[in-house]
Amino acid sequence: MENHTGDNSNKASISHVIFDMDGLLLDTEKFYTEVQEIILARYGKTFDWSLKAKMMGKKAIEAARVFVEETGLSDSLTAEDFLVEREEMLRNMFPTSELMPGASRLVRHLHANGVPICVATGSHRRHFELKTQRHGELFSLMHHVVLGDDPEVKQGKPSPDIFLAAAKRFEGGPVDPHKILVFEDAPTGVLAAKNAGMSVVMVPDPRLDSSFHETADEVLSSLLDFNPNDWCLPPFENAES
Ligand SMILES: O=P(O)(O)OC[C@H](O)CO
Ligand SMILES: [Mg+2]
């Protein structure tokens, strides 16, 4: 994967960081993929990454609508029924969620260096609790968490709602979007960050079409490759730590 850093004039002004959760901090996108493959197989269909690209990052009901419409199943399966059908499988998978490579190191580094950090996830409260069950200590380093079912998040990503709500809730907020760096894995999430006027580092799954990389200011294969120096953020003391 290319590791490009776009020409971005905001690089020297970044003071705050917003993290996406699913597929960025937590390796949970694989659960959604698995469950959707199982459901589609019941209808004799296969799941592909162009559909995945349209669903990931969205609120549950919004992603469900995309799913039934794009797969042509809307006559036999409503978006609401799809959510019910997948729920039991997801409920069993989420508590096993693991961190993505480099997530812990970056979150701890920024927190230890006084950079205000938060989470903005399309996930709703109930799923958030299941996914973060084993990661409470790491998530406690976040100044705040904005969830997909927050009343201020009228529309999910790619709407800027969730990132603007997150910017408001920092100490002394709202923080100027030009001072905020967002980390995202999803095409809809990258668009949401840009729609909010923020800078964005994309860490996409390699199976996503590379045309989705173009909107991001920087594209990395892994959070392990992030260099805070490139964004005038406090450098890692030991690159190997
Ligand atoms: O990527 P997130 O954290 O916004 O989560 C969105 C959905 O829950 C999963 O795609
Ligand atoms: Mg995500």
Image (spheres, rainbow, N blue to C red):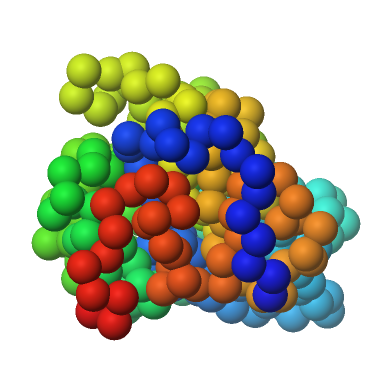
Residue 150 horizontal/vertical position (percent): 37, 30
- Going by the picture, which residue comes out furthest to the right? 72
Residue 205 horizontal/vertical position (percent): 62, 71
Which corner quadrant of the image does residue 104 belong to? bottom left
- Taking the spot 21% from the left edge, 68% from the top edge, the residue there is 237
- Taking the spot 54% from the left edge, 45% from the top edge, the residue there is 200
* Front one among 222 and 48: 222
Q: In the rendered view, tell whether residue 193 sits above or below residue 79.
A: above
Side of 5 where 141 appears, left or right: left
Q: How many marks?
A: 0
Residue 198 horizontal/vertical position (percent): 52, 33
- Taking the spot 27% from the left edge, 65% from the top edge, the residue there is 236
* Front one among 187 and 198: 198
* Front one among 47 and 158: 158
- Taking the spot 48% from the left edge, 40% from the top edge, the residue there is 11
Residue 235 horizontal/vertical position (percent): 29, 59
Query: The N terminus appears in which quarter of the rendering?
Result: bottom right
